[in-house]
Image: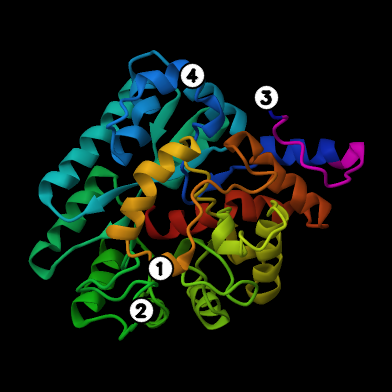
């Protein structure tokens, strides 16, 4: 079994102690949380229980469903071991039934786990941290709202399943364009109304998967902070999911936060070698801090997905290429992970890396979760 949280940064013992303290005492918020389960927990017995015919949705929730039935205690253990206080997990905004289903699923999780609470206000996140528990923030990446269905946003916000909502997920919608679209005309008239409604309801506008012009328009339109929950800096590695300096500065100018991913193929050409490491995520954090300041940087790891590589290649990759707006030229390597971020138990490596790179305690606390908590409190309450 891997020795998690032990990536070689060359830290002195006193630095290791400082990093451990900061990770333990800080409110750690992953703005796009795929955990806490790990590819490494899939024993042969668990693999045998997963039907070979399972699609990605079924496979991705298989261990969670077992945990809610009391059959997989490791779920809680992994969440604790990660040190994360809060994770953002999502729903799809398209139909009333879908919003209701997301609300029911969230309620099931909260009821099943006494150590998990919903985060309706910033105070809920602080209370979870103080109690040594965990909280969930509802997010929506796949936003397919149409003008006739705008009231679904109100329902999703009221149910707590959409505290952050992206303008578009990779492809074009009636709101705006996603980042893998060939052309991005920016926010539509309805898109402007969508941003206005988010501001009115106390929903955070997300631009993680939005195209460049749509991102800029959302920042210009919003009267409240805008975020990019999980992205990277195009100046370091140019890909469709990365954001230009102009976009990053626009998000920061709203008072918003930019979450940095741990997705290898958004940070480097994984086929070119050598094996990518957690240093890449730290490089992007460094770049953003220099560009917009530590008060606008956060974590949005979005990786690794909690399934074995062969299951991901069978279920997730075809879906990503057929319905999620990715194309072969995006070179998705769903089996790739960063050395030093194989598992959510490696989350402390980010804190250790920030210590190794000379960040002050206050900056580390901001990046780990304080910045998003500030935005959450300003927009949601």
Chain part drawn in magenta: 3-15
Q: State the residue at coordinates (83%, 57%).
A: 358
Check whether the beta carbons of the residues at disc 4 and disc 1 lie within 8 A of each other.
no
User: According to the image, label 4 marks what residue?
Assistant: 44
Q: Is residue 329 magenta?
A: no
Q: Nearer the viewer, mark 4 or mark 2?
A: 4
Residue nearer the viewer, 316 or 354: 316
Quarter containing the N terminus: top right
Dot placed on the residue nearer the N-terminal end, 3 or 1: 3
3D distance between C-alphas at marks 4 and 3? 15 Å
3D distance between C-alphas at marks 3 and 1? 37 Å
Helix, strand or loop status at disc 2: helix
Q: Nearer the viewer, mark 4 or mark 3?
A: 4
Residue 120 as seen in the image, left or right of residue 101: right
Q: Give percent across and percent down for residue 65.
A: 33, 24
Dot placed on the residue nearer the N-terminal end, 4 or 2: 4
Dot placed on the residue nearer the N-terminal end, 4 or 3: 3
Q: How many residues crowd around disc 3 within 10 Å: few (fewer than 14), some, or many (20 or more)? A: few
The label on residue 207 is 1
User: According to the image, label 2 marks what residue?
Assistant: 214
Which secondary structure dominates the residues rendered in magenta?
A: loop
The picture quadrant where one finds residue 298 is: bottom right
């Amino acid at each position: 079994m891997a020795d998690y949280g032990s990536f070689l940064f060359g830290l002195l013992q006193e630095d290791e102690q400082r990093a451990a303290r900061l990770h333990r005492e800080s409110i750690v918020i992953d703005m796009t949380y795929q955990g806490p389960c790990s590819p490494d927990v899939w024993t042969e017995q668990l693999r045998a229980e997963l039907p070979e015919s399972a699609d990605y949705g079924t496979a991705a929730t298989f261990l969670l469903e077992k945990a809610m039935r009391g059959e997989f205690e490791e779920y809680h253990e992994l969440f604790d071991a990660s040190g994360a206080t809060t994770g953002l997990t999502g729903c799809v905004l398209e139909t009333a039934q879908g919003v209701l289903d997301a609300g029911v699923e969230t309620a099931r999780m909260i009821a099943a786990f006494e150590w998990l609470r919903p985060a309706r206000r910033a105070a809920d996140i602080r209370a979870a941290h103080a109690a040594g528990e965990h909280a969930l923030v509802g997010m929506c990446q796949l936003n397919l709202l149409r003008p006739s269905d705008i009231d679904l946003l109100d329902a999703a916000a009221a149910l707590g399943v959409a505290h952050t909502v992206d303008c578009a997920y990779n492809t074009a919608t009636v709101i705006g364009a996603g980042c893998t679209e060939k052309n991005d005309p920016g926010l539509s008239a309805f898109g402007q109304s969508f941003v206005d409604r988010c501001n009115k309801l106390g929903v955070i506008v997300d631009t993680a998967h939005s195209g460049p012009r749509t991102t800029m328009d959302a920042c210009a339109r919003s009267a409240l902070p805008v975020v990019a929950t999980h992205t990277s800096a195009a100046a370091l590695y140019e890909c469709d999911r990365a954001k230009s300096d102009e976009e990053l500065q626009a998000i920061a100018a709203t008072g918003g936060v930019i979450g940095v991913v741990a997705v290898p193929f958004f940070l480097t050409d994984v086929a070119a070698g050598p094996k990518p490491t957690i240093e890449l995520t730290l490089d992007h954090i460094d770049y953003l801090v220099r560009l917009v300041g530590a008060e606008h940087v956060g974590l949005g790891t979005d990786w690794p997905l909690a399934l074995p590589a062969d299951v991901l290649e069978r279920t997730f990759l075809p879906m990503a290429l057929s319905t999620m707006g990715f194309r072969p030229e995006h070179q998705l390597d769903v089996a790739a992970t960063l050395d030093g971020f194989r598992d959510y138990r490696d989350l402390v490596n980010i804190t250790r890396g920030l210590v190794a790179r000379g960040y002050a305690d206050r900056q580390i606390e901001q990046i780990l979760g304080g910045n998003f908590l500030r935005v959450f409190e300003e927009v949601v309450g």
